Each structure stands twice: as structure tokens, then as C-alpha cells.
Image: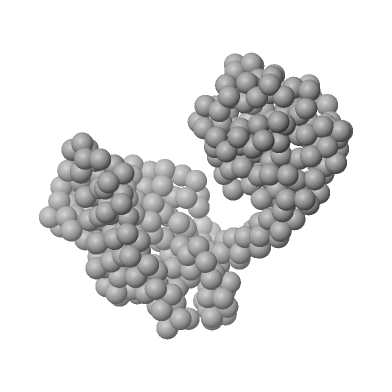
Amino acid sequence: MTLALAFATLAGNAQSSITMKFSDITVDTVFVENITKKSVDTLLVKNGETTYSCDAKDEVQAVEVAFVVDGEVRQLMTYAVPEENGIITASRKQLTYSGSKFFDEYDKYKSIVIDDQTRIQELLSEFKKKTLAGENRDSLVKVIRPQFFEASKRMEDKNIAYIKANPNSNVSVVLISYLQENQEELLSLISDEVKKGPFKNVVAEIEASIAENKALEEAKKNLAEGKPAPEFTLKDINGKDLALSSLRGKYVVLDFWGSWCGWCIKGIPEMKKYYEKYSGKMEILGIDCNDTEEKWRNAVAKHAIPWKHVYCPRKSDVTARYAIEGYPTKIIIDPEGKIVKTVVGEDPAFYTFLDELFK
């Protein structure tokens, strides 16, 4: 036995593969993004199939597969499971899973929700087709949205029922990761064996999401109108520390924004008008988020934004303490440092409120 083979034997075979087979459709290329490893592969299809392989070690890797059928991109999320070789068979109408424990289990789950999944896809296709044909978008939304929500609710209810009935299932862990609510309650039902198994990294992501949501809800409680605005100190456009408390004595608008945010940029001209209109009564502090410092500085210069600016690095907890969920978010603070109003989005209500406040 060679030394390399000996090490491989000791380490165990953690190789994983996902084979894509195409039954009644012609596909030339499959694009695979390994989200866990942050890598992208392009696979050629030969004789109607192709295989993606990776070293999954002792944890699953999240994989997104994409291919083009009849000019439309079809995408699906799945997992490369250690020591499992799954098969996904794609036809014009559906996907089937087989070949491994996880894929077989997922296919059984899928048979429960296939009618709702199909209905959701039909509604989305109908909306797209009719919109492109020139039908009124708002009218279509009124008709299709209730049907979409009804099918989505049925599917969510089935997901929750599946999780409760299958606490020893890795598929149940995946379904919990898709849910927006009740994650903590449902995760508590999952067996320790599953939590410590190959999907343990997915469990860790769910736990992190639960903790983040709890922190967000707690932050919202502390941001009610009349509550003191959380203090912070960030670097300004000149690289100097700027503390929120240094702006006491006049009204302050905290503008959480980014150069990447289209609505933030669209709102700058109106913000400039109101900055000039109430220049003696309020200050605006732009808090740039999810940007590089270079892009932030370039955006301030390009749009000639006249108010004060600070840079919020990704490691900062300022956005978490202010419960920022969308951009732009504008928070008005009174001269004593208490929160007066929060407006999310580029909303005319913000400017109406300023006019009422300063009349």
C-alpha cells in the first residue's frame, strides 16, 4: 500500500457526487455553484448526463445547479452529501431524485408537495407570459397573488407536518432552513443524531438565523419612538471618529444607505432639497453599509452629497442595533437623542413628516 493510499484509507472516503440525467430534454451544459466552497464549475453533458463530484468531508455542501431548457434557465438547490452519490433526473415537467439515502428520502417528500410546487410554477409562468404579452401588471397581481399565496400556504403547512412526522430526517433539517417562522420550535424536535450528522453545518446555520432574529426583535423593542437612539462611533469621510452624541442639539436624520442601492441613489436629489430647506433645524448623517470604502467615497463625490457621512464596516454591529432590514432606512432623532420616527424605503411619507415636524 502506498503512503498516499494509506492516508486516504485512514481518512475515509468522503467523496460525493451528483449525476444529472436528462430524459426528454436536450441540455448541452450544466452550471454548478458550490455555495459552501464558493466555487463554480461548468459541466458538459454527454449522452444525456453529466456528473459533479466533490470532497464533502464530514459535512454536506450546498450546491446550486442551473441549465437552460427552451431558452429558459432552470435552477435547483440541493446538497452534496458525504459518501453519497445522488441522481437527479430532469424531464420537461419534473425532477426526480434517486441513488442515495438523502435523495431517495427527498423524492418521497417531493411527492407530497409536487402538486403545490407545480401550481406555484404555473402561476409564475402565467404571470410572466401575460405580462410580456402586455396585460396590465396590477390587474394580474390582484388575480394571481391570492392563488399564489394559497398554494404557498398549503405547501408550508405540508412542510411543517413533514418535519413533525420525521424528526430523524435530514430532509426535515433542510425544510426548517427554508422556513421564515417557527424555526426554533421545529428544530427542537429534530433528533440529536441528525443534529450531529452530516447536516450539522445546516443546523448551525439555522441556529445562527434564530439568534439573529432574536437579536433583531430585541433591537426593535429598543427602537420604539421616544427611546434613546443607540450610541455609536464610526469613521467619517476624513477618517476621523464621529460619535452620534456629538450631533446633539438639533434634529438628526440617520440615513442608512449604500452606493449599490438604486432607491438610495434615486432619493438623493429630494434629500438635498430638504437638507437645504431645513439646514438650520436638522443634520443628516449618511451611514454607508455593505460597501467598500472606495465605492462609498466615490459615490459621495459623484453625487456631491453635502451632509455628514460615516462608513459602517461589515463587522460593525450598528445595523444590528438599529434593526436595519431594508435600504434606505431613515431614522429621525430629536435634539435630546431620542427616536422620533423610522421610515423604511424611499417613501414620500418621510418628507411629509419633516414638513409637519418643522412647520
The answer, for residue 335, to whether it is visible in the render is: yes
* Residue 113 sits in quarter: bottom left
> In x, y percent, where is residue 1?
48, 64
The correct choice, above or below, for 292 with respect to 154 in the image is above
- Residue at the limit of the structure toward the front, as seen here: 359
- Residue at the limit of the structure toward the left, as seen here: 24
- Count the marks: 0
In the image, what residue occupies the spot 76% across and 40% down? Answer: 333
The correct choice, above or below, for 101 with respect to 210 in the image is below
* Residue 205 sits in quarter: bottom right
Left or right relative to 133: residue 149: right
The correct choice, above or below, for 176 with respect to 311 in the image is below
> In x, y percent, where is residue 130?
20, 43
Quadrant where the C terminus is found in the figure: top right
Left or right relative to 6: residue 285: right
The answer, for residue 204, to whether it is visible in the render is: no
* Residue 165 sits in quarter: bottom left
In the image, what residue occupies the spot 74% across and 22% down? Answer: 279
Residue in the foreground of this view, choosing between 276 and 320: 276
Left or right relative to 139: residue 344: right
- Residue at the limit of the structure toward the bottom, as seen here: 165
> In x, y percent, where is residue 284?
72, 29
What color scheme is it?
one colour
In the image, what residue occupies the spot 26% across and 48% down? Answer: 140
Residue in the foreground of this view, choosing between 186 and 322: 322
Left or right relative to 212: residue 88: left
> In x, y percent, where is residue 306?
69, 19
In the image, what residue occupies the spot 21% across and 61% down? Answer: 94
